[in-house]
Amino acid sequence: NAGVTQTPKFRILKIGQSMTLQCTQDMNHNYMYWYRQDPGMGLKLIYYSVGAGITDKGEVPNGYNVSRSTTEDFPLRLELAAPSQTSVYFCASSAGNSPLHFGNGTRLTVT
Amino acid sequence: ELKVEQNPLFLSMQEGKNYTIYCNYSTTSDRLYWYRQDPGKSLESLFVLLSNGAVKQEGRLMASLDTKARLSTLHITAAVHDLSATYFCAVDSGGATNKLIFGTGTLLAVQP
């Protein structure tokens, strides 16, 4: 009963590097989300998807890209990492009109 | 644009005391959630409130929703140390996407 699985758990990037944060869910949820949480702050929505092949921007999409080729997977791509992208990233899924199920997060540091 | 505000941002309380966390939001919404986050952990869903006047209770926590005032409250009764965590409200921004806009959170510290 895995739920939402995120990898990696921790990552340190140098400025200008790129990486992909992986997210997969086994609950057959159509809706998936990426949030970032800065220290002492709430969560900000980066991108979301309502189904395979459909993605849209959230509150803070700049510097990120997503894709949704399958129901299960929703990777988040960082191109040209910047210190401002240092944060904890949470992936979540839902069946729609129901609580979001969150992964355990990826802690990213850009130096 | 939907804005969600919580207060207080930090709450230090003694065990056995009662207190209330407030969540205000700026535009009409049909759905409001409360989440709990322990330090370094993920978010756990506590309550979903779907209509005006909705009240949900679980143990020492009770959540309510007033859609006319655009206000939700999370009331803590006779706090215990195990309730120490950060509590977030999150409001559905509408459009059948279940996009949630989160408040900044309330860090609750229950002192013995």
Image (tube, coloured by chain):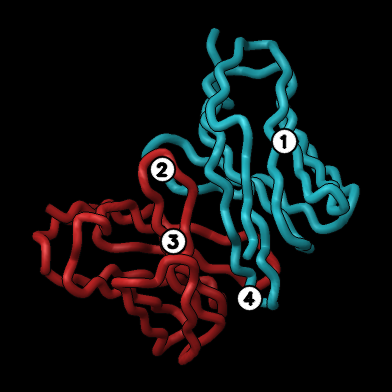
In the image shown, does B46 or B23 lie closer to the viewer?
Answer: B23
The answer to whether residue A89 of the structure is visible from this angle is yes
User: Numbered disc 4: what chain?
Assistant: B
User: Numbered disc 3: what chain?
Assistant: A
Q: Is residue B5 left or right of residue A107?
A: right
Which quadrant of the structure image shows residue A34?
Answer: bottom left
Give the residue number, with chain letter if any, for mark 4.
B97
User: In the image, what residue type sits under mark 2?
Assistant: Lys
Under circle 4, the secondary element is loop
- Give the number of the mark in front: 2 or 3: 3
Q: Residue A1's x, y, as percent?
A: 48, 61
Q: Are marks 2 and 3 in contact (CB under 8 Å)?
A: no
Question: Same subunit under labels 1 and 3?
Answer: no
Between the residue at mark 3 and the residue at mark 4, the CA separation in whole angstroms equals 15 Å
Residue plotted at (30% across, 56% down): A106
Q: Residue B92's x, y, as percent?
A: 67, 63
Question: Same subunit under labels 2 and 4?
Answer: yes
Give the residue number, with chain letter if any, for mark 1.
B74
User: Numbered disc 2: what chain?
Assistant: B
Picture colour for chain B: cyan
Question: Which label is found at residue B41?
Answer: 2
User: In the image, what residue type sits under mark 3?
Assistant: Tyr
Q: Are marks 4 and 1 in contact (CB under 8 Å)?
A: no
Crowd class of label 1 (few under 14; some 14 to 19; many from 20; radius 10 Å)? many
Relative to B99, say whether A103 is above or below: above
Considering only order in the chain, which callout, 1 or 2, is on the residue closer to the N terminus?
2
Between the residue at mark 2 and the residue at mark 1, the CA separation in whole angstroms equals 21 Å
Under circle 2, the secondary element is loop
Residue plotted at (33% across, 52% down): A88
